[in-house]
Amino acid sequence: MSVRIIAIINQKGGVGKTTTTANLTYALAKVGKKVTVIDFDPQGHLAISLGLFSKQHVGIDAVMLGEASLEEVIIPVRENLQLVPAGTKLQDIELLNDGGVQRGDLLRKALSNSLQDQDFVFIDCPPSSGLLVANVLFATEEILIPMASDFMALQGLSHLMETIRKFEKVLKKTYKTQLVISRYTASRRLSKEVVAKLQHYFPKQILATVIRETALLAECPSFGKTILEYRPSSPSARDFHDLASDFLIGKVM
Amino acid sequence: MAKKNESSLIEYDPLAWMNTEEKPTDVVAILPKQAPDLESLASDALSAKVILQATQSIQNVMQLHEQLVDILRNTSDTIEVDASAITACDTATMQLFVVLKQEMLQLERNLVFDFPSDKFVEAADLLGVSSMLGVDKSAAGFF
Ligand SMILES: Nc1ncnc2c1ncn2[C@@H]1O[C@H](COP(=O)(O)OP(=O)(O)OP(=O)(O)O)[C@@H](O)[C@H]1O
Ligand SMILES: [Mg+2]
């Protein structure tokens, strides 16, 4: 069984990519899965969410540029959970200009034949659709899209699906694509309609548990803790616990 | 799922294209090409430029329409229209810009007019769309 690489992707900002990555991967690690997370956003929010408050200077950037090996930059952050930080040069890679198609293939090469002892590698993508995200789409077969439950999220998703289809065509592959409702405001009727719309276009592709919008979830990154550590008995901790189980058994809407 | 006649809170459906025919995708290089493009990609805003001929009328509006639709499809987030050369612009062309501007805003994209000539601003004013198109007099004064 080879390692599954999953991109947490959505070019729209603030939809819950990092929150989903941190909490879902921790929940998976907690049930014994071996998980590596890659902070692929130059902002470095994932590292912070997991408690690494000081800037990590070397990370996946150096591996992609051939300046370090993956093993050298991996940081164990919890039991069964290890982090590859972004590194300061990641934002330069976004702007790389020469190197032809190679420019898109740096991440895939950096990961190839590595992490074979892991069950999952999750990549927390930046909110853009430039070269970094292109690298992710070269490197993965599997995509998890966090979605907020508002109208503009649908618009953003349309844009994302266009990009994904384009890559599928050119790279001649079909991504296993799943969605997670990562910021669900139950009190709004629009939320239900948005989810219904998504079910229509993505039948059996939306993970069954929705992550509700809660104050606690917004609080925990500043403590460098996942919700399962910060408030283990909160509804949000349960949401992520359930989401992890949905993810493992493929329970969808 | 919401029934048709129930008042829906979602009027425009951005995903509608997914179940119909696929949006045309050129097998163009899927990687961004030049540095300026890359930089704008990083901030998620590709832009493309259109330069208008001196006279815009019903005779060439179809051609312009096709050109704009083509650009719209090819992933540009912002379309910049250079309107500096305009000496005459008819209603049909203005209407096209109004529809395009509305549509692009809905798609979270934008249509901007660079260096609008006096005649262009005048035509927009006449139809009461100059502020909607973002071509007010103050901007035009520079050129
Ligand atoms: N379900 C939720 N309930 C409450 N707050 C949330 C929830 N999901 C995310 N947030 C908060 O919203 C903000 C944006 O979330 P997050 O950073 O996970 O999004 P992102 O998609 O990774 O953003 P970016 O595009 O900037 O990388 C954060 O402050 C986060 O704490
Ligand atoms: Mg993030």
Image (cartoon, rainbow, N blue to C red):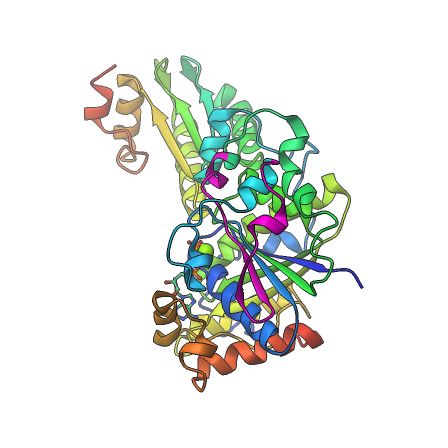
Q: Is residue B90 magenta?
A: no
- The image position of residue B118, as x and y in percent, is 26, 18
What residue sits 23% from the left and 24% below the top?
A: B139
- The image position of residue A119, as x and y in percent, is 70, 65
Q: Looking at this rendering, what residue extends furthest in the front direction? A: A72
Q: Quadrant of residue A197?
A: bottom right
Camera-side residue of A243 and A149: A243
Camera-side residue of A220 and B61: A220
In this rendering, the count of numbered labels is 0
Q: Is residue A81 magenta?
A: yes
Camera-side residue of A186 and B95: A186
Q: Quadrant of residue A186?
A: bottom left
Q: Quadrant of the N terminus of chain A?
A: bottom right
* Residue B11 seen in this snapshot: no
Q: Which residues are magenta?
A: A66-92
- The image position of residue A238, as x and y in percent, is 51, 83
What residue sits 63% from the left and 43% below the top?
A: A107
Q: Quadrant of the C terminus of chain A?
A: bottom right
**Vertical position of residue A249 compared to residue A45: above or below:** below
